[in-house]
Amino acid sequence: MIVAANAHPPAPHIDWAGLSPLLGLLGAATLVLLVGLLRPRIVREALVPLIALAGFGAAIGLGIWQYGEQKDLISGALRLDDLTIVLSFVFSAGGAAAVLLSWRAVAPREAAHGEYFSLLLTSAAGMWVLVAAQNLVTLFLGLELLSIPLYVLCATEMRRATSLESGLKYLIIGSVGSATLLYGLAFIYGATGSTDFGAIARALNGDVATDALLLTGIALTVAGLAFKASVAPFHQWTPDVYEGAPTPVTAFMAVATKAAAFGVFLRLFNVALIDASVDWAPALATLATITIVVGNVGALGQSSLKRLMAWSSVAQAGYMLAGVVVATRLGVQATVFYLAVYLMMNLAAFAVIVIRERETGLGDDIASVQGLGAERPLLAMSMTLAMLGLSGIPATAGFIGKFYLIDAAISGDYAWLGVVIVIGSMVSLAYYLKVIAAMWMQEAPTPGAALATTGQPAIAGGSTDAGRPRFEIETWFVALLAGAATLFFGIVPSPLFDLAVDAGRSFTGLF
């Protein structure tokens, strides 16, 4: 008894190389926070963003170093595989773009640069934990580490009421989503007796339809994750939060949060709950259809570009959900591919919105891009490629991505869902082409239009000197690079295909 009392349980083996991308993000977050305490202005406004940028770059570089590894981390709580690494590329690239878009924004100055960029890095670290999680407890920890920094980031423009409103709404609704997910995970644990994804899969004996506890857990888990992925009818927060948050934060949320949410969707439902797919797949297919319809219809009447992109993101979540529904390796590959191209298209659009907010003083109203084709043809081209890509026009990466999703749906015996994706894409042309027409076919508004259009002085969009023509190299770089990538990968998609195929191989033996 004395020997047993004095015995120490063995410590879990920690693969530091496998954890290195996560450590890079957390280390950079700590360093940014400390450096941000220094008084010199050049340190806060230049060095801090550079360190944050280096942190995201380090996460990508360390991911490349570990690419091809397939191993468990920390006693199986996390899984390092190509799915984890490829998705980490997506949200790390989104985080780096958000740093560039935030460089001269108001939000970092009001929130303090160290805290602002540290929160971005910490949220990205939560995304890494979430997509790598193969345990219910780790999944929830990753979700909260992702979400809590975003609640604060949405409210960082503290002198703007809509930003504070955005943060409060996201906090309240996000908390409801987290609580719903936690109940669902608890029910799954109660039904299977395990929190490990592999053990849960082994506990399912095929008679899922009669297990009310497990079905309730799956339903609540779907609802909780749907909040994060903006899946209807759990999307209500999306338009208000996207519109009120600082635009760089909105861009980060639009691409990175969706990548993390669908990453955990893929791993949880294609590993732990794969044997119950006959029960949850039809429900997810119905949710995907509702989401496509609600997102496209909601975007039709929008005059705010950020609200239009919010409703667009709802519809896009419906398209991506098709890859989860089919529960096949092809579905995983199609979802990962679309998440990568969705990153490019959204960053191009949001970068142009940021630039026009600061140049015109019209905020995110569609009037801010009127006449852009004559004034800034390169920016107009980037926005045009983003809109055409999101609508699925050929020769853009969005077309290849949607074609991949439709192929997965048809191969998985959900041909009708592929038809819904096609119809939804046709409807989306109505609002995407409206933005293109405003840029190329309408004249720029008169200088006094800011007050008439927005009802407020020209200070919208996170800039106190909005309305002055300017050239900010970092925002132009994001806009032009993302627009060019949307076109390039629409013509030469093979590099992204290879990444998506490697991510699909993470599930070898499951399908």
Image (cartoon, rainbow, N blue to C red):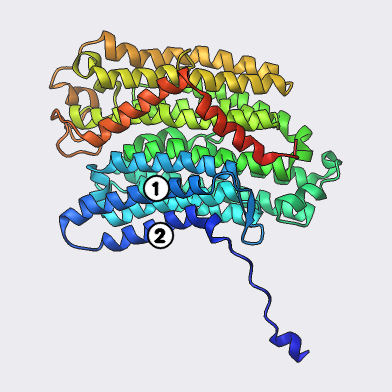
Q: What kind of element bears circle 2?
A: helix
Q: Label 1 is placed on what type of residue?
A: Phe
Q: Quadrant of the N terminus?
A: bottom right
Residue 58 horizontal/vertical position (percent) = 41, 50
Identify whether 440 is placed above or below 169.
Answer: above
Number of the label disc, if any, that sits on residue 197: none
| 394 on left or right of 210 | left
What residue is shown with label 2? 27
Quadrant position of residue 332: top right
Alpha-carbon neighbours of circle 2 within 10 Å: few (<14), some, or many (≥20)?
some
The outermost residue toward the top is 441
Q: Quadrant of the C terminus?
A: top right
What residue is shown with label 1? 56
| 341 on left or right of 373 | right
| 445 on left or right of 102 | left
Quadrant position of residue 344: top left
Identify whether 38 is placed above or below 57.
Answer: below
Q: Is residue 476 among what the camera can see?
A: yes
Residue 328 horizontal/vertical position (percent) = 70, 31
Q: Is residue 151 among what the camera can see?
A: no
Q: Residue at x 70, y 28 (%)?
A: 326
Residue 375 horizontal/vertical position (percent) = 19, 17
Identify whether 136 is placed above or below 14.
Answer: above
